[in-house]
Image: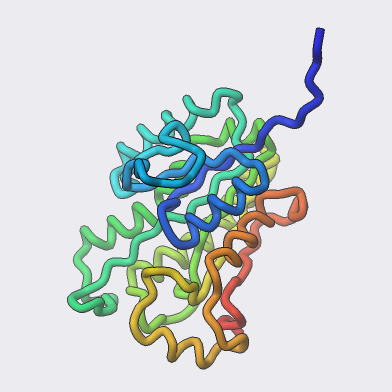
């Protein structure tokens, strides 16, 4: 009888995988041999050059709690081995006003505030709780993507987005305390101004004030996420890592 000594292929579930930081994260983990189950509002694009096909993509509307529950069950079904090494909660929304105007605390109606918090805060804990047995089986890791906007008033990020990201940072600490006894680590990555397609006009003015005097790259955030999902951070939980070129100092 042949007994395989091969290490099982590690698996990550990633929300917000279709662009920017999410897309870079897919590439970083896949290049290291991980299976990546990607999640986004869009279906898997037929012209995507990625080797993984629709069988490793789940279309989900994180603003709809019922759809989050449906998608969570689909995720469990696709994890045939019952193990999940990493859950990365990257998806987020930041509604804008006319002409890209920042929406302050007085500008957005309550329904839109609820939608922002559902996507940016409630969906991450719903997914983590729904997949807790699979994470426990792998002594897995959860990474929540927060934001520099969660710590200060930002010229472009709206009040609802910033508030949800501040709450997500707090939730990360709470999850670390509650999930830790199960062998699951929970940490956060807090990006600053990252060079993606959704940069707001005027970002160059912020860059001039940063200690490193440049935008961050999606790949640099992806490397930080990877760190939190591997044995290199095996004794780190409840942390929030700033990836912002010194913007927080």
Rendering coords of residue 218 (x, y %) = 53, 65
- State the colouring used for the structure image: rainbow
Foreground: 155 or 197? 197
203 sits to left or right of 96: right
- Residue shown at 30%/49% (left/top)? 63
112 sits to left or right of 126: left
Q: Which quadrant would the N terminus be assigned to in this image?
A: top right
Classify 87 as above or below 242: above
- Residue shown at 60%/53% (left/top)? 28
Classify 215 as above or below 231: below
Rendering coords of residue 85 (x, y %) = 63, 39
162 sits to left or right of 129: left
Say whether residue 186 is visible: yes
Q: Which of the 4 image quarters holds residue 180?
A: top right
Residue furthest to the top = 1
Foreground: 37 or 239? 37
Q: Which of the 4 image quarters holds residue 134?
A: top right
- Residue shown at 37%/84% (left/top)? 155
Classify 215 as above or below 69: below
Rendering coords of residue 209 (x, y %) = 53, 92
- Residue shown at 29%/44% (left/top)? 64
Foreground: 147 or 169? 147
Rendering coords of residue 42 (x, y %) = 32, 46
Q: Which quadrant would the C terminus be assigned to in this image?
A: bottom right
Query: Count the marks: how many?
Result: 0
Say whether residue 128 is visible: no
């Amino acid at each position: 009888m042949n007994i395989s000594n091969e290490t099982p292929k590690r698996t990550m579930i990633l929300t917000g995988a279709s662009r920017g930081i999410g897309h870079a994260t897919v590439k970083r983990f896949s290049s290291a041999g991980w299976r990546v189950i990607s999640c986004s509002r869009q279906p898997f694009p037929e012209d995507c050059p990625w080797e993984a096909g629709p069988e490793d993509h789940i279309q989900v509307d994180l603003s709809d709690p019922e759809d989050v529950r449906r998608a969570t069950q689909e995720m469990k079904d696709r994890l045939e081995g019952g193990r999940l090494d990493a859950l990365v909660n990257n998806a987020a929304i930041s509604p804008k006003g006319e002409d890209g105007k920042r929406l302050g605390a007085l500008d957005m109606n309550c329904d839109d505030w609820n939608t922002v918090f559902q996507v940016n805060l409630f969906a991450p804990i719903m997914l983590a709780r729904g997949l807790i047995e699979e994470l426990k089986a792998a002594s897995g890791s959860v990474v929540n993507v927060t934001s520099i906007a969660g710590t200060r008033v930002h010229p472009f990020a709206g009040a609802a987005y910033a508030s949800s990201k501040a709450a997500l940072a707090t939730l990360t600490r709470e999850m670390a305390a509650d999930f830790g006894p199960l062998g699951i680590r929970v940490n956060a990555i807090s990006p600053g101004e990252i060079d993606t397609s959704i940069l707001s006009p005027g970002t160059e003015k912020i860059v001039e004030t940063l200690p490193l005097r440049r935008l961050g790259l999606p790949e640099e955030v992806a490397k930080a996420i990877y760190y939190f999902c591997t044995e290199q951070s095996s004794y780190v939980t409840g942390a929030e890592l700033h990836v912002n070129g010194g913007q927080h100092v």
